[in-house]
Image (tube, helix red, strand yellow):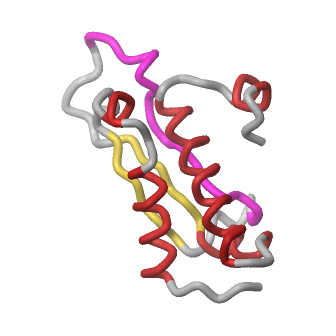
Amino acid sequence: MLNIPRDEFEALVAEALDLIPPELTALMANVAVFVEDDPPADDPNLLGVYDGVPLTERDGWYSGVLPDRITIYRNPTLAICEEPEDVVAEVEITVVHEIAHHFGIDDKRLHDLGYD
């Protein structure tokens, strides 16, 4: 398994977020992005997760709530990558995948778009 320190991995996530077009990031609302080393024990291969209410499901009741969370998991990402360049690519894909969930795009549609 590659060894990329936590701070460097966090920087890769930040760089992946910077690649999101400004017109999309301007639409993102009440969402925070985190990096954790390990996913929940019941899903050890999870690379990332979106936990919240997608923008497409928010209406008048949605106010005063804690931010949605996007969490990117470092260790399973490093475990599936062979080269540092692979980590960069996988982080970018995972960040886009989880942001898509924030916008209400489901896994089936992401699969159709090539984001597996």
Q: Tell which of 65 and 55 is nearer to you.
A: 55
Q: Is residue 27 above or below residue 32?
A: above
Q: Which residues are magenta?
A: 44-60
Determine which quarter of the picture holds residue 53.
Answer: top left
Q: Is residue 26 above or below residue 85?
A: above
Extreme residue in the left direction: 64
Q: At 60% from the left edge and 59% from the top edge, which residue is drawn?
A: 91
Q: At 38% from the left edge and 30% from the top edge, which residue is drawn?
A: 24
Residue 54 belongs to the span the image colors magenta: yes
Name the spot of residue 22 as percent of width and height, x first.
Answer: 33, 36
Determine which quarter of the picture holds residue 48.
Answer: bottom right
Q: At 67% from the left edge and 71% from the top edge, which residue is drawn?
A: 85
Name the spot of residue 20 as percent of width and height, x first.
Answer: 44, 42
Q: Is residue 81 above or below residue 64?
A: below
Q: At 28% from the left edge and 21% from the top edge, which residue is drawn?
A: 62
Q: Is residue 29 left or right of residue 46?
A: left
